[in-house]
Image (cartoon, rainbow, N blue to C red):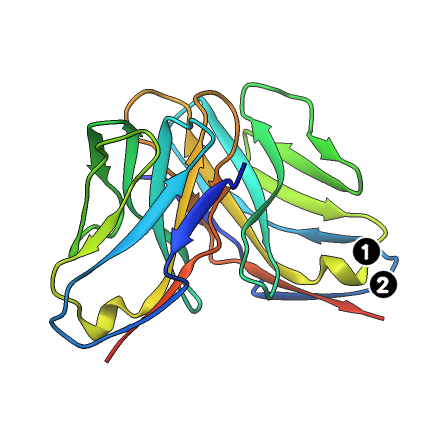
Amino acid sequence: NAGVTQTPKFQVLKTGQSMTLQCAQDMNHEYMSWYRQDPGMGLRLIHYSVGAGITDQGEVPNGYNVSRSTTEDFPLRLLSAAPSQTSVYFCASRLQGTGGYTFGSGTRLTVV
Amino acid sequence: AQTVTQSQPEMSVQEAETVTLSCTYDTSESDYYLFWYKQPPSRQMILVIRQEAYKQQNATENRFSVNFQKAAKSFSLKISDSQLGDAAMYFCAYRSAGGGADGLTFGKGTHLIIQP
């Protein structure tokens, strides 16, 4: 049982490049979400999903796309990276009910 | 939209003493969940404790307990017998219990320093 797995752990992109941050969970959790963490800002919700085929926007969705074709995977896509997207990105999942989210170990992304 | 406020950017406590971290939130909802997460230098987000808004009893987990005041929209975390391993960033978070929107709303965090 690996929990929530994020890949890669570190990434450097050039402005305008695209990439996908991968997130997979093996706990059969229905709910998944993506956050970004910037210094002094806490974590902010980018997108979330309440089940396969269902996604919605969070607080800071601009510049990011998501899809949820399976229960296990919830990738985050940056279509055209910008320096403002330099951040640490966390993926998280939870079961339906009262539990809190279980987090992955994060991806540190730098856009130059 | 809900907001979560942590008014203490940094707190310092002597090892073995007790410290309380403050959190207030704003919401128009009546049913929700509140959480405290710990983030050590490793960057991993670790769930410390959770509270269901419909429960009046304050949650406890070993040395960690909360003071949940629903009317005041306050949710403080008390750490008893502080240990060096408690040093970390602590984030207060909110999640709606109603159908529809999901995900967590976080405060900006409190950096807890443990003095040996």
Q: Can residue A68 be seen?
A: yes
Q: Are marks 1 and 2 in contact (CB under 8 Å)?
A: yes
The residue indicated by pointer 2 is B15
**Pointer 1: residues within 10 angstroms few (<14), some, or many (20+)?**
many
Residue at the image point whose x is 82% and y is 53% from the top: B18
- Residue B66: which quarter of the image? top right
Earlier in the chain: of badge 1 and badge 2, it is 2
Query: Extreme right residue here?
Result: B16
Badge 2 marks a residue whose secondary structure is loop
Residue at the image point whose x is 45% and y is 34% from the top: A26
A3 relative to B104 in the view: left or right: right
The type of residue carrying mark 2 is Glu
The type of residue carrying mark 1 is Ser
Q: Which percent across, then down, holds residue A41?
A: 40, 62
The residue indicated by pointer 1 is B82
Residue B72 or residue A71, whichever sits in front: A71
Q: Can residue B104 be seen?
A: no
Task: Please determine whether, in this image, residue B8 is positioned above or below residue B62.
Answer: below
The chain carrying label 2 is B
Task: Please determine whether, in this image, residue A1 is positioned above or below residue B46.
Answer: above
Distance from the alpha carbon under mark 1 to that under mark 2: 5 Å
| Labels 1 and 2 share a subunit | yes
Query: Extreme front residue here?
Result: A1
The chain carrying label 1 is B
Q: Which percent across, then down, holds residue B23?
A: 56, 47
Badge 1 marks a residue whose secondary structure is loop
- Residue B67: which quarter of the image? top right
